[in-house]
Amino acid sequence: MQAEQRLKPHEPGSACPVTAKSGQAVLSFPAPITWEPETAECFKRLYDSRSEPLARLKELVRGALQATMRSTRCPYCLIQKGRVFDHFLDKASFPEFSIEPTNLVYVCSECNEEKNWSGENAGTDVLFPYFAGLDRNVFLQCRIDVFGDIILPVFYLEFTDCEIDSEMAYRIQRHFDKLNLKDRLETESIEFARNFVTKYRFREGNVDELQIFKEFYEEEIELNRKTYGPNFFLCRLYRALIDHYLGEL
Ligand SMILES: [Zn+2]
């Protein structure tokens, strides 16, 4: 019985812990298997060892991720650079996926700390970046609040004009909550917003200059959208700034 359990695969014919339905953001996860403690320890040691094959595997995963995204940004937040490997399905619950490439996500230190979940929440709190497939819809919104000289970008989620069902909307909301993304995006955006407004003030009253200025930022939005998708925070921030300051043009 125990030997059979040790040899049992997770899903028929699949070594991958996650599956995606033809571009839809639908994921399913295997239930954790209760391994013998000794076996679980062996799996974990595969990851913890400083072996050459593991170092190579990590290098390949990093390279594939960066090539796909054309960037070194953390795929959970798209704010900071990747620094450490996160096990999407945690090692304690899924030791057998300790070195599974699709379970290794190269993330920033902050996301790694914020995520910090395991067990029954595995795979449900944070969106799986390799199969998210959410780029057809804009659900991240930004507005600009101004208090005297203070400019505050405010980020929020809105699903009213999206083809995203309520279950996925709930998951996106959890992703944002879990990783504290609202606060982090707003903090990160302040400097970009200040920079925009300083340049805007310099050109204020000059319609031709403002038109060129607007086109420059429209192009920035397009370039960022192509690389990171329409919900990348700079796309949403620049859209809100253009609407707020240059809506009349
Ligand atoms: Zn991150």
Image (cartoon, rainbow, N blue to C red):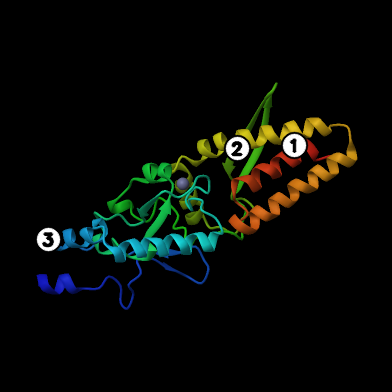
56 and 77: which one is in front? 56
The answer, for residue 22, to whether it is visible in the render is yes
Label 3: which residue?
38
**Can you say whether 123 is above or below 195 in the image?**
below
User: Hey, what amino acid is under mark 3?
Assistant: Glu
Q: Quadrant of the C terminus?
A: top right
Labels 2 & 3 near each other (Cβ < 8 A):
no
The answer, for residue 144, to whether it is visible in the render is no
Q: Residues within 10 Å of mark 3 (few under 14, many from 20)?
A: few
Label 1: which residue?
244
36 and 199: which one is in front? 199
Residue that protrudes farthest toward the bottom in the picture: 13
**Can you say whether 229 is above or below 17 in the image?**
above
User: Hey, what amino acid is under mark 2?
Assistant: Ser
Point out which mark residue 30 bears: none
- Residue 162 in picture, x, y percent from top left: 61, 55
Q: Residue at x 64, y 59 (%)?
A: 226
Distance, label 1 to label 2, CA atoms, is 15 Å
- Residue 70 in picture, x, y percent from top left: 56, 59
Distance, label 2 to label 3, CA atoms, is 48 Å
Q: Nearer the viewer, mark 3 or mark 1?
A: 3
Instruction: Count numbered badges in the picture.
Output: 3
Q: Secondary structure at mark 1?
A: helix
